[in-house]
Amino acid sequence: MSKEEVFIGSVDQGTTSTRFIIYDKSAQPVGSHQVEFTQFYPEAGWVEHDPMEILESVRLCISKAVDKATADGYNVDRGLKAIGLTNQRETTLLWSKSTGCPLYNAIVWMDARTSSVCRKLEKELQGGRTHFVESCGLPISTYFSAVKLLWLMENVDAVKAAIKKGDALFGTIDTWLIWNLTGGINGGLHVTDVSNASRTMLMNLKTLDWDKTTLETLGIPAEILPKIISNSEVIGKITEGWPIPGIPIAGCLGDQHAAMVGQACRKGEAKSTYGTGAFILLNTGNEIVKSNHGLLSTVAFKLGPKAPTNYALEGSIAIAGAAVQWLRDSLGIISSASEIERLALQVDSTGGVYFVPAFNGLFAPWWRDDARGVCIGITRFTSKAHIARAVLESMCFQVKDVLDSMHKDAGEKGEVRNETEEFLLRVDGGATVNNLLMQIQADLLGSSVVRPADIETTALGAAYAAGLAIGVWKEDEIFASGQKIKTSTIFHPILSEELRKKKVGSWCKAVSRTFDLADLSI
């Protein structure tokens, strides 16, 4: 007799890798597969992905995960009821409606080539950098899809020609995947969800539709844009030619929003995901909270076409785990990412070294695309262990900067605290397996950090959204957060308040040294 007969799949398409995880009805993983794909750096500050390679990575992961689960005795062919999808946000591409071929590589969220587009818009528009904040909650920045789309429209002949012919389709990675999974040139569905759409700079946060005034101001044709849907509904079925034809796609969220669902973040609760970058989101319920301290107003999730919309305050950090990859791939200080904890533990401090990974500028709360990376306080005493520890601290300092802004914007009424009046930060993502990183985070925050038993909450959140849409789970089951904390690991701060303040002061000094460095001579 085969094991559990109800399964939900989850495609998790990240910045450096793709995976597919199959969950049973108790939300336990029963099979998974993950592959890394190529990062292209054509020029300094440019980052691209090959959309066709991403498609193939999804195909391979689904096939291998199903094979693994089946080999372990799970009847996935019969029991798989739906899949959810979650993806790297803001990453932008255009493709031909008639051929299905990309018109250019996908321009990745951290790509900084559009800084001149941003400067031009800031000068021309009455509201400057905050011109569109009222409608979309976002400042003009290289981070968001709209300016990447403008760059493609201005600089790529194939894009210009396809738009002129009415043959161009725009999308973030979710849109590209769904279009291909549901048929591609043979009737593929051209849709995006509210969370991904909220990161384009083009969606009105109140109406949850494309903002006509913004489109007119930027000269973006509405006909190239996908239809906006909720995060939890049956979107369409996977077509023949894919490993699991006929299975419905029933959930779609941007990765950080999926992590909020996976972490069961209710109103007033926050999570921080540590991946290539780091992303801190605080659920503000049905209220759009405007930030006066460098954060973004965004959609958290909308779990059904008629469900209420939850909004969030977000602080986005461009470089977190990517700094560890840099130590490994560019400097050769470590040979695998997991080595950094052991190396950093060889010393009990950074020895006065402070590292700010402003490789492509700084995101929240600074928003300085003229910033570049610095490593200060180096002496003859400095070793690679000190630098490794400074890299870990840089991730935690950046999260602290965002949370300080979040506390100011949300105020006491906007946050949930425990019985000892402590604000608990929920953490997830691959880097959180690093116990030293989590302890440093608690020390620099001066408050506790909660790591769930399953740290891969992004994939879980997309599975929850799909299962919710087809009735496998109820919302109350998903948000039974009290039960999750019982199986979590909690890191409590042990650093003295005096030393914490001194270290924060030194960090702020290091951040100030990164500004106005974008035009250094090569």
Image (tube, helix red, strand yellow):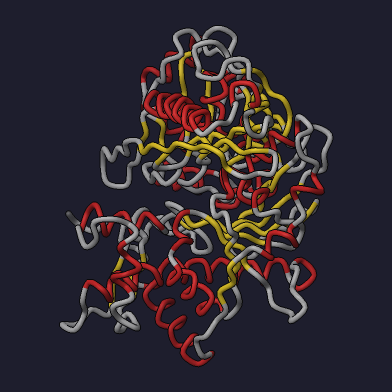
Give the number of callouts. Answer: 0
Query: Residue 275: x and y, percent?
Result: 46, 53
As drawn, the residue found furthest toward the front would be 1
Asked if residue 58 shows in the view, the reply is yes
Question: In the image shown, does 390 or 129 lie closer to the viewer?
Answer: 390
**x and y percentages locating residue 86 in the rendered image:** 57, 38
Q: Position of residue 419 (x, y in %)?
A: 77, 78
Give percent across and percent down for residue 283. 71, 56
Is residue 131 shown to the viewer in this render?
Answer: no
Instruction: Pick the quarter of the image with the C terminus.
Output: bottom left
Quadrant housing residue 482: bottom right
Above or below 132: residue 326: below
Assign the N terminus to one quadrant of the image.
top right
Q: Residue at x 63, y 15 (%)?
A: 246
Looking at the picture, does residue 492 appear above or below residue 175? below
User: Residue drawn at (50%, 17%), measured in percent from left and top?
Assistant: 242
Nearer to me, 282 or 409: 282
- From the viewer's side, name the closer residue of 51 and 259: 259
In this picture, residue 479 sits left or right of residue 123: right
Quarter where residue 348 is shown: bottom left
Depicted 490 relative to depicted 243: above or below = below
The quadrant holding residue 503 is bottom left
Residue at image location 22% in from the left, 71% down from the top = 384
